[in-house]
Image (cartoon, helix red, strand yellow):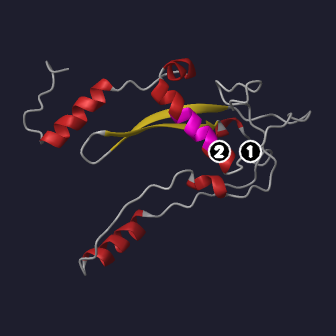
Amino acid sequence: MSNYVSNHRLSESNKSFVNQLSTVVIPNSVQEALADPRWKAAMNEEMKSLQKNETWELVECPPGKKPVGCRWIYTVKYKADGSIERFKARLVAKGYTQTYGIVYTETFAPVAKINTVRVLLSLAANPDWPLQQFDVKNVFLHGELSEEVYMDLPPGCMVSAKQC
């Protein structure tokens, strides 16, 4: 990489960040993730969060119902100085396999419009108020569903060993 990219104009924290990017390997499969204790710990943390929030319960899929698949998404979260904050594994449903009007009837996601964000930043910047940013883990797990949704077991989940 050093033959193609020069980092001599970057600050020390940005150099650290760029170097971290080239050293961390994000897994392409569950098998790769389970082989690395850092990713395995991230997957366990996500599963504990899902269980703690009572997001789901383990049941048999009734006849006539089609379960939604799921998969793991892996990302690395970095601190402002470029060092690694944590390894994050997120379990996501394969919602694209569902059919509107048959499996579900509406969608909703609370997202702020960029104009609203700009107004809030402007209101805080004019009187020179301090701003803070924080991350809410598993914020979307608290929604109420009116439909029954069945999902396949997460890849790498061991039911007999109670590891899911």
Viewer-side residue, 62 vs 36: 36
Tell me what residue is drawn at x 51 percent, y 35 percent: 42
Location of residue 60 in the rendering, given as x and y in whole percent from the top left corner: 86, 34
Q: Is 111 located above or below residue 37 in the figure?
A: below
Q: Amino acid at mark 2?
A: Leu
Does the magenta stretch mainly form a helix, a strand or a loop?
helix
Q: Which residues are magenta?
A: 42-48
Residue furthest out toward the front: 161
| Residue pointed to by mark 1 | 56
Question: What residue sits 85% from the left and 34% below the top?
Answer: 61
How crowded pointer 2 is (Cα within 10 Å; few <14, some 14-19, many 20+) is rated as some
> Who comes first in sequence, dot 1 or dot 2?
2
Q: Which mark is residue 111?
A: none
Which amino acid is tagged 1? Trp
The residue labelled by disc 2 is 50
Q: Percent x, y for residue 18?
A: 23, 33
Q: What SS does tag 1 mark? A: loop
Q: Is residue 159 magenta?
A: no
**As drawn, is 87 to the left or to the right of 118?**
right
Asked if labels 2 and 1 touch by Cβ distance under 8 angstroms, the answer is yes
**What residue is rendered at 81% in x and 34% in y?**
66
Viewer-closest of 114 and 48: 48
Rendered image quadrant of residue 85: top left
Query: Gap in Å between the C-alphas at discs 1 and 2?
Result: 7 Å
Point out the image quarter for the C terminus: top right
User: x%, y% of residue 36?
Assistant: 47, 22
Crowd class of label 1 (few under 14; some 14 to 19; many from 20; radius 10 Å): few
Q: Nearer the viewer, residue 164 or 110?
A: 164
Does residue 67 appear to the left or right of 112 in the view shown? Answer: right
